[in-house]
Amino acid sequence: MSYKGFPSHSKVSKEDQEFYDLKNKAAEYYRSNGVPQKIESVLNEMFWQKPDDIYGYLANYFSGLSYTPVISKITGKEVFDGRGLTAVQAEVHCIIRNEEKMVCGAVMDGSFDGLPDGVESGEMLSNGDLQHLSITTALKWIRENFSPVLRGFNPTDQTNVDKILSDFAMARYLEHKDSLIREKEEELRNEAMSEAPPQATPTSAPAKDKKGNDKGKKGNITENPLPPAEPPVPRLPGATAVGAVSLAVAKTAAELLGTPLYRHITAVRDPQVVQSPHSKKDSGSSLGWAQKEMQLPVPIITIMSCGKNSAGKLNLLEEIILMPSSSLRVREVIGMGLDLQCEMRRILNGSTYKALPVGVSDEGALQVGFDRPEQALDLLAEACANLALPLGSDLHLAVNCAAHSLMDYSRGKYEVMSGCHKSPDELVDIYEGLINKYPAIRSLIDPFRKEDVGQWERLASVIGQSCCLLADAASNLCPRWREAKPLPPGATKAIIRHHSDMTISDLIQSIAEHKETILAAGSGDASVVDLAVGSGVSFLKLGGLRGAERMDKYNRLMAIEEEQEGIAGAGEINQPVSFESESGWNSLTVSAK
């Protein structure tokens, strides 16, 4: 819009002149930003299309011309997770069309944060001071470090965001490690000073001491002493902030892009994938390629638990897990698991079994008190036969032994049943007998402690290709800023859990580097399902079929499957290989507690 000046011979007031100058500045401002041309263009387009919602049409048009949202701040708060334990929630705020809005948040449980590896949640509850320190440290990191540094970042730049988080954690981890070393050295010096005075006693009665030592050596040779447990690896207090912020940024990016989280994770893993679903002209090219290549993981279900927390004598079968064929749809697998649980309950209520205590485990599975492992496996086999389920062909089993929790260090043996202790070598024979009697068992998880390397190797040679050994608690995989250790010999794969100190990039990198691993995520919302799908894993372990938090994850997997079927057709979805083939074992699994 132009504005003509006043004639030179006319008298103009000061107010009129200022108003005239202001209009000229406004016209130049709009002209320099192309506003008149854009308004003219959208009005012409809208006239021909004649939309019902005129202002909605204009809002959509101008939204596409707005600046890319950037992070304005990140906040953190202390919350409770699904198990009633304190956790950290990170929330990402962005500047969107000149307004600051909270876009997405993420909660990472802090049950392992700041605690040594192998510490159980029950032990953690008695150590509230350490947990409180971890939570307050994480909130401080978010408030004083992550929020200022990430201000102005595009939330879709996941790789660089994760690098900043990991570099910060690396520096803090090295400082924490040095402080622990100094504390240990100081403790050793104090012990040496306190034990210095009594030094003359070893010279008396040398013959008796030598005789006693010889006798001890002879006993050790025959008893084959138990390797001592490795010292626990302390985790970095506050590191839960790393995982919470990383996941919150990923969810924020997906929300702003208007795309499901699993597609955004796929784009982070493979930058060639086009993320924007609004490019309808390209829906048959790059985006269509991404959807066509999407791989849906097969859910494997914890169907029964007969571990230490069950009422019977049996401790060895912490989890019995169903591993279905990849040809089944998610809804079919869940229905099969529910039917199987109902049938097992019906059998337990019959006359064949005497009254056994039945409950629900923390993993959402049927918890039955048995005295021998054969009883549990026979029950499952009978239920499968009654339902005509193909156990051993299209349906296999995995057994999580959780042997690290069964070791009685005072005896140097595993307490496989209450009052029944077995040496590591004897345990090899037990596993061999179970696998021979029940060939449907295709994998054993944590059959020994990670220190019993000889037994891992011996069991692997005994069972051959008929069964696979997996390491969960016996694995030492960790974020890139911590030292990883090799798997026990004989273990073909490791379970990687999405710990609170891992970024999304750490998770993707771990999958890429360990082709024969099982990926696992901690407790939390249904985001773990999107992480599994976006990371391209083949199997997804979500626990049992009880509990709202777990069923939300199963429902999310069903929703993704239905979305993919609606886009590409059920026959075009890539399914992972079956457990029956050898290549099927070279796949990845995500599990969530």
Image: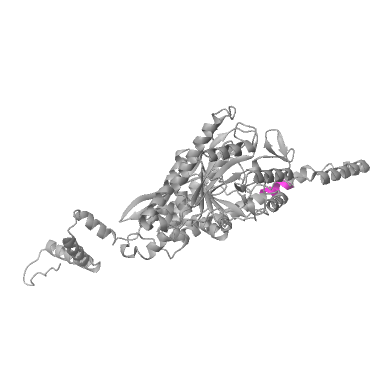
Magenta-drawn segment = 183-188
Compared with 199, 479 (above or below) is below
Q: Residue furthest left?
A: 9
Compared with 553, 345 (above or below) is above
Res. 581 in view = yes
Residue shown at 88%/42% (left/top)? 215
Count the labels in the image. 0
Please name whichever residue, 509 or 543, is drawn nearer the observer in this view of the structure: 543
Residue shown at 13%/61% (left/top)? 15
Q: Quadrant of residue 66?
A: bottom left
User: In what quadrant of the picture does the N terminus appear?
Assistant: bottom left
Compared with 314, 271 (above or below) is below
Q: Is residue 444 left or right of 267 when viewed as pictured? A: right
Q: Is residue 178 left or right of 511 when viewed as pictured? A: right
Q: Position of residue 118 (x, y in %)?
A: 62, 44
Please name whichever residue, 196 or 45, is drawn nearer the observer in this view of the structure: 45
Please name whichever residue, 347 or 103, is drawn nearer the observer in this view of the structure: 347
Residue shown at 13%/63% (left/top)? 14
Q: Position of residue 243 (x, y in %)?
A: 50, 51
Res. 121 in view = no
Q: Is residue 131 left or right of 246 when viewed as pictured? A: right
Q: Position of residue 246 (x, y in %)?
A: 47, 53
Q: Quadrant of residue 423?
A: top right
Please name whichever residue, 313 or 111, is drawn nearer the observer in this view of the structure: 313
Q: Quadrant of residue 158?
A: bottom left
Render colour scheme: one colour
Compared with 341, 263 (above or below) is below
Is 184 inside the magenta-drawn segment?
A: yes
Magenta region's main secondary structure?
helix
Q: Position of residue 592 (x, y in %)?
A: 51, 46
Is 186 inside the magenta-drawn segment?
A: yes
Q: Residue furthest bottom?
A: 8
